[in-house]
Amino acid sequence: MSYTIVISKSVQKQIDDLPNDVVERVVERIQNLASEPRPDGVIKLKGSDNEYRIRVGDYRVRYEIDDESQLVQLLQCKHRKDVYRKS
């Protein structure tokens, strides 16, 4: 059972803007979400029914899981000081 990962242009730009040493680790963790959308260390975020975040060093990847259509929609990939601020 594999999930489809949906990355919007804005999130792809956030990933592209990360430091080079972080990009590889973030991409690997994102790819792993396809087979295990709720890996060890995942945190369910308050205020939403299906919003989660994973930690990669000082960076956070926020995403939503839709189990019915087997989709993982990436919402943000930013430094921890920026990821929880309302835009």
Image (tube, helix red, strand yellow):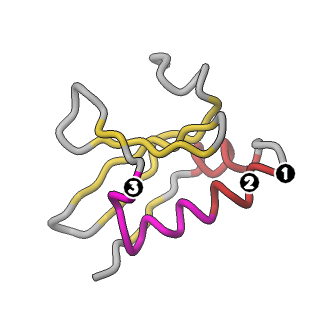
- Tell me, yes or no, whether the two marked residues, 3 and 2, touch with CB atoms within 8 Å: no
Which residue is labeled 3 in the image? Answer: 40
Mark pair 3, 2: CA separation: 20 Å
- Residue at the farthest right position: 20
At 64% from the left and 30% from the top, the residue drawn is 79
From the top left corner, tell me how far across and down residue 63 is, in percent.
40, 47
84 and 11: which one is in front? 84
- The residues colored magenta run 28-40
Return the residue at label 2: 23
Q: Looking at the picture, how far across and down is residue 44, in whole percent?
A: 29, 39
- Element type where label 3 sits in the image: loop
Q: Residue at x 68, y 57 (%)?
A: 25
Q: Is residue 4 above or below residue 65?
A: below
- Measured Cα–Cα span from mark 1 to mark 3: 25 Å
**Quadrant of the rendering where the N terminus is positioned:** bottom left
Q: Residue at x 59, y 43 (%)?
A: 10
Q: Secondary structure at mark 1?
A: helix
Q: Quadrant of residue 57?
A: top right
